[in-house]
Image (tube, rainbow, N blue to C red):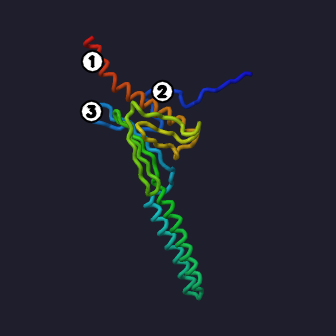
Amino acid sequence: MLVSTAPSNWSARPAAGVWRFGRVLPSEGGDGGVQWVLKRNCSLTPGQLLGFYASVCVVSLGIAVGFAWNGAPVVLWFAGIELLLLALALLFYARHATDADTVTLSGQDLTVEQSFGALRTSARFRTPWVSVEPSQGDGSLIELSGQGQVARIGRFLRPEARADFARELRSALRHSLQSATAPADAFQDQFA
């Protein structure tokens, strides 16, 4: 019996210093860290949505009042019901328009802040003990675990991009660990 396996694409390494998903945070003294903001792809902000809804209300009610003025008051009732249902749909959209996963790596701390509707969660990990793995398999959410905490991130990324993000996060974690141990090694070498 012959068995062959393909290596998992979750363990390959990206080029050092290249951040596809993240951005480098500025700092006054040294390495400021890296931040990844994974959020929904929304075309309208809640403020723009309010402006859109107001314009729809003006047009719809203007037409309905014209019909009511000419003897068809039932059109005004239907316009009111239509605007109420549209308001409910837009409220649901606006509630989830700012959903995001924010991952911040600063020094030896990895902070994960998640927002989904009104629910806000936060988890803080120490980089030497954090594990970055797929929660189910390739293409699934990314599970960060360590020190008794678990955070699943990446729901706003396409499944095929989650492996690339996991590689980038692992690379940043390795870099933060190497930069933290480098001065201590240099100090020990100096007095050896």
Among numbered discs 2 and 1, the one appearing first in the sequence: 2
Q: Which residue is mark 1?
A: 187
Q: Nearer the viewer, mark 2 or mark 1?
A: 1
Residue 147 appears at what percent x and percent y?
A: 40, 37
Q: Which residue is mark 3?
A: 29
Q: Residues within 10 Å of mark 2 (few under 14, many from 20)?
A: few
Q: Name the element at disc 3.
A: loop
Q: Is residue 54 above or below residue 43?
A: below
Residue 188 appears at what percent x and percent y?
A: 28, 16
Q: Which residue is mark 2?
A: 15
Callout count = 3
Q: Residue furthest bottom?
A: 71
Q: CA distance from mark 1 to mark 3?
A: 20 Å
Give the camera-side residue of 40 and 148. Answer: 148
Q: CA distance from mark 2 to mark 1?
A: 28 Å
Horizontal arrangement in the rendering, residue 158 relative to residue 150 (left or right):
right
